[in-house]
Image (cartoon, rainbow, N blue to C red):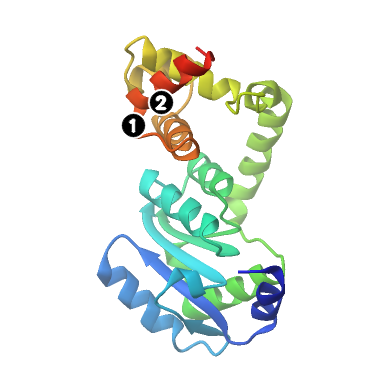
Amino acid sequence: MNDRVREHELAMRPIPTYVAASDPISRAGLAAQLRGQGDLALVDDADRATVAVVVADAVAEEAVRTIRTLMRGGVLHVLLVATILDDQGVLDAVEAGACAILRRVDAAPERLAAVLVAATEGHGTLPPDLLGSLLSQVGRLQRGSLHARKVLVNGFTEREIEVLRLVADGFDTTEIAEKLSYSERTVKNVIHDVTTRFNLRNRCHAVAYALRTGVI
């Protein structure tokens, strides 16, 4: 979809909105609530959506993958609604592309609609008690991890190379997380990003590809 069409969509009211949830009951319940909001128009196909709501119990691998998939598919703004939120989960969701995050207890229909409309106008939303923690984490990443996250000529980041070297040495996800002081979720996301970006089948294929390209 070209930029002119997207600009037209942004000016539209109601806003084409897609709801993604791991279970049909949550999806149907939230969709029913949002149908009463005049600024939003529910669509069944993510390809037609300008904004999307992802509903999850916690910010686990499935939720992060869903956010990335929606963003890559052309959805402009993603709101995450989760029952459980912590500092790492918020950071993972933001890194995946979410521009707004709400706790489920705060996700009244009117509040959801307001956040989605604000997102189309370029405004993000985070729980106030987690905003300071997120800013602190981002600052630490910028100060201490810029080199590690730098994309190299061969298309890998140094963090990805570190993880793949340990996979090649036979370490599992838990062991890699302990050695590199990452969460297990972060390790899984690193491997998923590599396999997705290079169209690889699994972590063994990722190690073989890294070996062939000479990065490990």
Residue positioned 57% across, 44% down in the render: 95
- Above or below, 138 against 29 in this view is above
**In the displayed structure image, the side of residue 211 where residue 57 appears, left or right:** left
Q: Which residue in the rendered view is the most extreme toward the top?
A: 169
Which residue is identified by label 2? 206
**Label 2 crowd (10 A; few <14 / some 14-19 / many >=20):** many
Residue positioned 39% across, 19% down in the render: 208
Q: Secondary structure at mark 2?
A: helix
Q: Amino acid at mark 1?
A: Asn
Percent coordinates x, y for residue 106 in the rendering: 48, 67
Percent coordinates x, y for residue 122 in the rendering: 72, 65
Q: Secondary structure at mark 1?
A: loop
**Residue nearer the viewer, 160 or 123:** 160
| Circles 2 and 1: CB atoms closer than 8 Å | yes
- CA gap, disc 2 and disc 1: 6 Å
Which residue is identified by label 1? 202
Q: Amino acid at mark 2?
A: Ala
**Residue nearer the viewer, 197 or 37:** 197
Residue positioned 40% across, 34% down in the render: 200
